[in-house]
Amino acid sequence: MTLAAAKEKLHGIIDHADEEKVFQLLLLAENNDYKTPVYDEQTLGMLRERSAEYLSGKSKTYTIEESTERIKKHRQKNGI
């Protein structure tokens, strides 16, 4: 795709976008210091493994309420 074609496509998207989408696109365009994280193969492997364990039910997960309670108990125990 050429630059001109990409710009034309973006104009079409913006012309037909609702208010929320327009502001999301503006935020994305103005946040020019955002960089896509780059992970090495070891990190990607670990993330894939954890994801698979979560999806298969092998790993224990907690609700936000359970996590908050665990943090509170840890802080009380350690004087934080």
Image (spheres, helix red, strand yellow):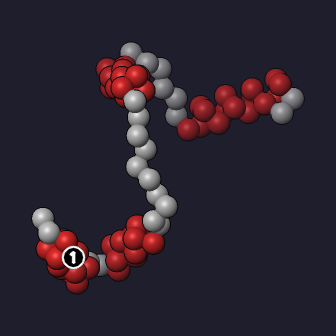
Relative to residue 71, is residue 56 drawn left or right? left
**Amino acid found under the numbered disc labelled 1:** Lys
Task: Identify the residue at image location x=41%, y=34%.
Answer: 39
Task: Establish if 37 lies above or below 63.
Answer: below
Whether 43 is drawn above or below 65: the answer is above
Q: Residue drawn 43% across and 18% down?
A: 59
Q: Residue at x 39, y 15 (%)?
A: 58
**Considering only vertical position in the picture, is 54 above or below 14?**
above
**Dot 1, how many residues are within 10 Å of its Cα: few (below 14), some (14-19), or many (20+)?**
few
Query: Where residue 29 sits in the image (x, y, percent)?
Result: 40, 71
- Reading the image, the residue beneath label 1 is 7
Q: Nearer the viewer, residue 56 or 48?
A: 48
Q: Residue furthest top?
A: 58
Residue sitting farthest toward the right: 79
49 with respect to 61 (left or right):
left
Task: Give the percent coordinates (x, y) of residue 5.
Answer: 14, 74
Whether residue 59 appears in this view of the structure is yes
Query: How many numbered circles are shown?
Result: 1
- Secondary structure beneath disc 1? helix
